[in-house]
Image (cartoon, coloured by chain):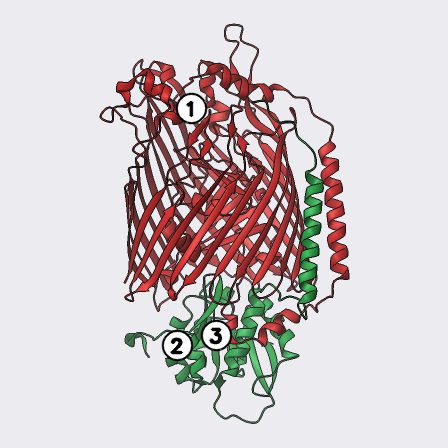
Chain colours: A red, B green
Amino acid sequence: MAYSAMDQSRNPAVLVFPSVVRSSVLSPAGVSGRLPSRRWRGAATGGVLGLALVLGAVLIAPRAAAGESAGDLAGMALEDLMQMPVEVVSGVSKYEQSIRHAPAGVTVFTASDIQDYGWRTLADALRAAPGFHIRHDRFYEYTGNRGFTRPYDYNARTLILVDGHRINDAIYQQGSIGTEFILDLDLVERIEIIRGPGSSIYGSNAFEGAINVIPKKGRDLAGGQASLAVGSEPSVKARVSAGDRGAGGLEYTVSATQWTSRGERDFDLPQSWRDAAPSLFDDRNVKNHDDTRHQSAFGHAAWRGFEAEVAYVKRDKDVLPPVYDTTPDRPARGADERAYGLLRAVGEPLPDAELSATVSLDFYDYDGLFHPISSNLDPQRSYATSTSINTEIRWRQTLDERHNLIAGVERQDNLRQDIGRDNLATRVEEVRVRKSSSYLSPFAQVDWQLAPALILSTGVRYDHYNGSSQSTTPRLGVIWDCTSATTIKVLYGESFRAPTIEERFASENGVVANPDVDPEKNRSVELVVEHRLNEVWGVDAHFYHIASSDLITTVLTHSNPLDPGEITYANSRDVVTDGFDLGATAFFANGSRLRASGTLKQSVDEATDALVADAPRQLLKLNASTPLLRPWLRLSGELQYVGDRRDFTGGPVESYLVGNATLRATRLWDDWDLSLSVYNLADAERSDPKNEGRIVAPPRLVVLHATYNF
Amino acid sequence: MPPRRVVSRWPWAAFLLGLALLVFTGTVEARLSGGGVAAVSAENLKAAYLLNFMRFTDWPPAPKSDSYLIGVVGDRGLEDALLALADVQTVHERRLRVVRVRSARDATECQLVFFGRATAAGADSALGVPEVLRLLEGRPVLTVGEDPGFLGLGGMVSFYREDERLKFEIAPDAVGAGGLVMSSRLLALARIVRAPATLQP
């Protein structure tokens, strides 16, 4: 049956309402006609006028001397200096630079944010980031970053990094952000959220943006931690960590986490299902609940210029029946396993120059068992395994004492890329792919300091995929500190996502593989205005126009008379996104923090002129945290509004407002941190799109978290 | 449900909102005397810290000089920030001079030496940090670094980051060995690091 190709090997081949699904998935994609560039002109006019206005306002505004800021600081008291945020980011250009001068819009969350707001997964943190919405289909979570998500896609348009190391795997290119993410979020020191194309520095998958997660180092831990979190699902998460840096310069971190959750026990299954077969839903019969088992470990050691890091995660997930339309009385589960080990050496061969070399070994493994209704409830085992070696050599230099150069070469050898699906009842191998591949990618970026207040950032990367595609992705940024408190950035960037092994090679009955499918491309123009009003408040605005082209979609082949429904993968969809994010942050003298953002955007399919699915047009976020009565007690809350959108079959998904709150006490009796979090305070019912239709999001959850520091 | 048709008013909405934002910021800025405070670059912040460290430190009496010498190893950005400050700021009513430290001997001439992160990257960098620190041991030179291992090598003050803030730690033993006296206010704000007894020379 043709449609099963949509989910290929990883998920069960299921189809409950073929006509609905097929028409909605296929119809817009097959049309290749383009509209006149009406929106381009509109956006360009708006952009040019906006820019002219900003420049005019800036020229009229009283100018501050370029050196004023350093002088201002030197006159400040030490206590005040210790409260000044140092805004640095390392994930934009592969070297540490000030956020203000980085060629991208950046949001940074810290360990305090994670603990104060009680974020349990990377997805929880991203929900609070400007321009992001998260789709949770109760198996995985997916980021929509200034745009949209796609069905049957594993979050391959956002690059996930751990301290600069690529986490997206060599099979599905999945950017894992849920409970299957490789780090325990309590072990994270900071999260750099980089919006906009990042392929000029990272290559594939930095399509909509990149998330760089930096784990705690020995100096951050400086001792040990034992932590226990008990949730109302019920769930139990236990973690033990230790880290320090010794006098000899050796710094280390070790940590291990075990997290089990029963998830939602009384999941609200469709009434029609219950009516059809009541006995199936007797709890004694239900075999696929919402259980999650997560085990992870992390280790890091650094000495002088050498660094070693290992990380491992295995997440077993029982998959609720509606996720893939399986029946409750048969198992439906998938296990994701990821691991890497890396070695890095950094040296200074010349003054002002730094040379670093990194080699890593990466593993990914998926194993799933499903009983799809569409395949007569036959048990089907899906699997995927990859092994890769990644090598990168990087040269960083200060030129003429002013300009910053970074250049390097990255090579990845995917030694093994296996995917398959076996029907265990008929003993038929429905999908079988055994591949290996490699890519070689030189990149360079120079940040030219043209004047004390003006930086021109120029970067380009060439990705050569052996035996298939090539991509060249540039990035250009003009960054102007027009006053001591205002920075304007004009950014142009291109990015791509290479097709997955599955999209190129996984043929099966009704699906023709397309080895020649090209990478998806993205071009983005962005205007950023960042302004610091005073010691407390900062505001920023980002206006963007993003043209995503050649999105990989399934289309009918129209070539097989025996199967008119036969499909293949093609670069058949173009989407244009226009929008803006407005944000404000505040750090008050009493220790209160506030972060608010609003987004208005729209993503339009170029062929049909219709709004694309899972692309909410409005997002509002508010995060506030304040000391309560005592300095060691803190109350934090977040509110998130996600505007209405459509699911992938065209149905409406209602807007929702969700609130979370955390009360946290630090250093109680010297050594204890305690927190109580309530997620989805109002227990509001809300849904997210899944591959077909919608699925209800988790209900209210209460978590008590205790950490002992030793 | 049929997909809604698109109304192409977004660029204009964006434009109007940007306008509103600018008017808002412009108004607020005009009301704040002297304009806003700059977003902080790490270099400017470190430079301001270094001046504050000097203000809260007393050096043993030395031959009359009307200026303090600040040495920088391996951080051009900080050099620039310090040079900008040196023109307008004084410490203990003395002028400030900034030099790039090229040899261990240069360092002994300074009242304060800052070691940039890059210099700690390799053991055999152009100027070996451990060697310079050893040479400065017991001398009245305030040594400030930012590498995690800096205090372990015998440094006096080290920057570290916490919650996106720049903070500092002090090894009072090393400070005292150099004959420097730090004010209690400085020590109260710092994280104090005492070397394990076994590591004392």
Residue A111's spot in the image, x, y percent?
42, 56
User: Helix or strand or loop: what does disc 2 sit on?
Assistant: loop
Q: Which amino acid, by three-letter code, is at mark 3?
A: Val
Residue at 36%, 34% in the rendered image: A365
Which residue does the numbered mark 1 point to in the structure image? A433
Q: Residue furthest top?
A: A562
| A262 relative position to A167: left or right | left
Q: CA separation, marks 1 and 2?
A: 60 Å
Q: Which amino acid, by three-letter code, is at mark 1?
A: Val
Chain-order first, disc 2 or disc 3:
3
Q: Which mark is residue B144?
A: 3
Q: Which amino acid, by three-letter code, is at mark 2?
A: Ala
Q: Which mark is residue B171?
A: 2
Quarter that holds the C terminus of chain B: bottom left
Tags 1 and 2 both on a single chain = no
Whether residue B188 is visible, yes or no, is yes
In front of the other: A294 or A362: A294
Q: Which mark is residue A228?
A: none
Can you tell which of label 3 and label 1 is closer to the viewer?
Answer: 3
Q: Are marks 2 and 3 in contact (CB under 8 Å)?
A: no
For disc 1, the neighbor class at 10 Å (few under 14, some 14 to 19, many from 20) is some
| A87 relative position to A634: left or right | right
In front of the other: A28 or B95: A28
Q: CA separation, marks 3 and 1?
A: 57 Å
